[in-house]
Image (spheres, rainbow, N blue to C red):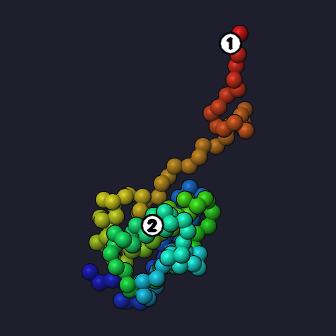
């Protein structure tokens, strides 16, 4: 299968998790990955760096693509998950044979998690969507 990097094509994909949205742009290059203009190698915390690297490890050596990811919104873990998904989608676009590998490993690499928080209801706006006022029995 011919890689798109050899054809000088730019790949753009998005990844989402909760409120975080990551946009990945892949161009032919030397295999560098940057997140919000910082190298993935200096990304902190270490656990999230390894989490983001999972699609790169599963794909093997990716020496012909530079992936630039910009992430906005959400929290730290949501941003890491969104970046991970965006990277995985760009790698699949570059090499279609990786799709089955990613799906067998973890389906969230390619499919966004649709769960969202439930909206608060009017009677208990501070306590959450389902919590009721405590009642005394005596």
On screen, residue 29 above or below 54:
below
Label 2: state its secondary structure: helix
Q: Please give the residue where the numbered disc 1 appears in the rendered image.
A: 137
Q: Tell whether 6 sits left or right of 77.
A: left
**Residue 63 placed where, x, y %?**
37, 84
On screen, residue 120 above or below 33:
above
On residue 50, which mark appears?
Answer: 2
Q: Where the N terminus falls, by quadrant?
A: bottom left
Label 1: state its secondary structure: loop
Of residue 114 and residue 33, the one placed in the foreground of this image is: 33
Answer with the quarter of the image where residue 36 lies: bottom right
Answer with the quarter of the image where residue 138 lies: top right
Of residue 59 and residue 121, the one placed in the foreground of this image is: 59
* Image mark count: 2
**Residue 121 placed where, x, y %?**
68, 37
Q: Residue at x 61, y 59 (%)?
A: 74
Residue 84 visible in the shown view = no
Residue 56 visible in the shown view = yes
Crowding at mark 1 (Cα within 10 Å: few <14, some 14-19, many 20+): few
């Amino acid at each position: 299968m011919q890689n798109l990097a050899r054809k000088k094509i730019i790949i753009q994909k998005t990844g989402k998790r909760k409120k975080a949205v990551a946009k990945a742009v892949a161009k032919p290059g030397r295999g560098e990955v940057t997140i919000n203009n910082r190298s993935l190698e200096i990304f902190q915390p270490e656990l999230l760096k390894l989490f983001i690297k999972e699609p790169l490890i599963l794909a093997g050596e990716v020496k012909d693509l530079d992936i630039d990811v910009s992430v906005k919104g959400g929290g730290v873990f949501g941003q890491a998950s969104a970046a991970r998904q965006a990277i995985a989608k760009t790698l699949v676009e570059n090499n279609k044979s990786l799709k089955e590998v990613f799906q067998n490993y973890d389906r969230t690499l390619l499919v966004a998690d649709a769960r969202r928080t439930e909206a608060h209801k009017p009677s208990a706006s501070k306590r959450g969507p389902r919590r009721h006022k405590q009642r005394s029995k005596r």
